[in-house]
Image (cartoon, rainbow, N blue to C red):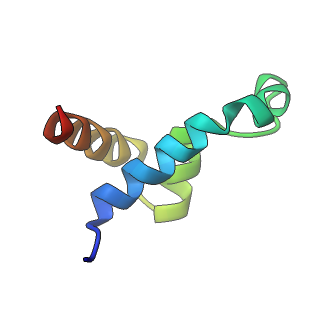
Amino acid sequence: MSQTRECRMYLMWRALKRSRSFQYEYYRKGWVDGPLMQVARRFKVPIRVVRDAIDAQRGSAA
């Protein structure tokens, strides 16, 4: 079963949010970008595209 690009973006964002406890100190000091920015850089798209993909996945899951 292949995953769509939006689904992969959502899953990566969710994994980054869950691992936030390990990265919190770096994030607070500004050494690490937030989860949205990390996903946007990985997929080479603007943040608004990532936000739209996350909203779409949340809407379809609910």
Relative placement, left or right, of 41 versus 21 is left
Q: Quadrant of residue 7?
A: bottom left
Give the residue at x 29% y 57%: 6
Tell me: residue 5, above or below residue 57: below
Horizontal side of residue 59 vs 8, given as left or right: left
Q: Is residue 52 above or below residue 24?
A: below
Residue drawn at x 55%, y 43% as measured from the top left: 37
The x and y percentages for residue 56 are 20, 41
Q: Residue at x 40, y 54 (%)?
A: 9
Question: Can you name the residue that lies furthest to the front here?
Answer: 1
In the foreground, 34 or 22: 22
> Which sits in the foreground, 30 or 18?
18
Residue 25, how many percent across, how many down? 85, 26
Placement of 45 over or under 15, stated as above or below = below
Which residue ends up furthest to the bottom in the rendered image? 1
Q: Nearer the viewer, residue 39 or 13?
A: 13
> Left or right: 61 with respect to 12?
left
Query: How many callouts does the rendering have?
Result: 0
Please report the residue visible at 25 percent of the width from the left and 77 percent of the height from the top. 1
Q: Give coordinates of residue 21: x percent, y percent.
A: 73, 29
- The percent position of residue 22, horizontal first and vertical second, equals 79, 35
Q: Quadrant of the C terminus?
A: top left
